[in-house]
Image (cartoon, rainbow, N blue to C red):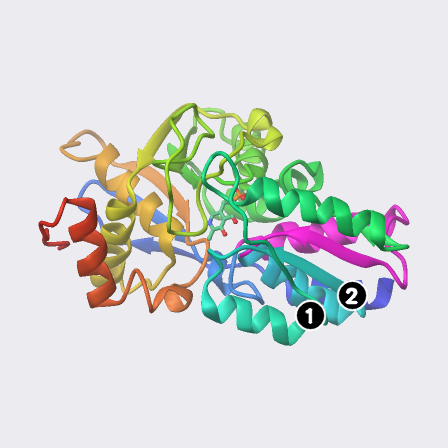
Amino acid sequence: MLTRLAMVGRAMSRTPLVQLRHDQLDLFAKLEYANPNGSSKDRSAYWILRRAVERGEITEGTTIVESSSGNFAISLASFCRWLGLAFIPVIDPNVNASTEAYLRQLCDRVEKVTESDDAGGYLSSRLDRVHELRTELPLAYWPNQYANPDAIEAHDKLTGAELCADLQHIDYLFVGVSTGGTIAGLSSRVKRVHPEARIIAVDAEGSVIFGGPPAKRRLPGLGSSIVPPLVGKAHIDDVVMVSEVDAVRGCNHLFERHGLYAGGSTGSVYAAIERYFAGYSGPRLTVAFLCADRGTGYTDTVYHPEWVARFVAEHNHGQSVALV
Ligand SMILES: Cc1ncc(COP(=O)(O)O)c(C=O)c1O
């Protein structure tokens, strides 16, 4: 197991940091979609598995069980294959078709819940199913991405360390939030190395993480229908809430201006940066953000002209609005 784990570790090479053209800012994007399974969730999946193996909580014959309909499930499915471990993802109807097909190919068993919870999401139903599976299976390990401190350590020791090694100075770091693992880990490293840096959390309208009212959200990646305990460990200076329409707009702007084809959460973060510094004309600031995943999982939604037209019209009560 340790040899196979070392192989996974070697596949986790440093992700690139690129500077984007900008009139007012020194703007840097860390391309987390260059991770082996295409997202920043490789960091936490690898680190959580590694720590659990080191502690003896995962051994040959352990089945990994986790609630995720997205990138974390993709990372776990792939790494569990490498490690020779069974993995049962618990997914919900919001999963995108290509992710579900991929998970069904990689995992012998996929559990799909169908009942939504009081907040209109599926998180509670998924967690209930995880708990049932843990009692059913003789040797089960639940990474619990919403509360596992190893996810914080992953982004401190891996993503955060790389970012701080690449940038001599950081004024602002914008980070999308769902479980809070990324922002908790990154903020702790960045504040240690660059105490002057301001950490801006970006969340989706309809998410309850920062106290807003719950509402239906359609784009995966950002937001949560619970307040995840890891968020309380993050050093956050400010919060920007972004609508899904602005997330779509952010994705399209990022692609048209910089050629970066990123997923919905990155679009939200880019939209948050645009809004935060609109009209700014002071000295140049160093601003960094992550491209958390690729746009290829969003070709039927964020990057599909007809889907976007319908989506924008719905959000604007039947009136279409230009995105660019
Ligand atoms: C694409 C993407 N961006 C951002 C996030 C938020 O990261 P975290 O869960 O560490 O808060 C996620 C989480 O699933 C994600 O998949």
Residue 252 visible = yes
Name the residue: 79% across, 67% down: 83
CA separation, marks 2 and 1? 7 Å
Please give left or right for residue 164 compared with residue 55 in the image.
left
Identity, as a three-letter code, of the amino acid under mark 2: Ala
Q: Position of residue 87 (x, y in %)?
A: 73, 62
Residue nearest the observer in this picture, 53 or 289: 53
Q: Which residues are magenta?
A: 40-69
Badge 2 is on which residue?
A: 86
Above or below, 45 relative to 78: above
Q: Residue at x 63, y 38 (%)?
A: 152
Residue 64 position (above or below residue 152): below
Name the residue beneath numbered marker 1: 107
Q: Is residue 166 left or right of 275 when viewed as pictured?
A: right
Residue 320 relative to residue 76: left or right: left
Residue 223 percent coordinates (x, y): 45, 40
Determine the image quadrant of residue 255: bottom left
Q: Where is 203 relative to 68, above or below?
A: above
Characterize the local packing of mark 1: few (<14), some (14-19) or many (20 or more) Cα atoms within 10 angstroms.
some
Asked whether the residues under the numbered discs 2 and 1 touch, taking CB atoms below 8 Å apart as contact, a structural biologist would say yes
Give residue 242's quadrant in the image. top left
In-front residue for pair 288/231: 231
The amino acid type found where label 1 is placed reads Cys
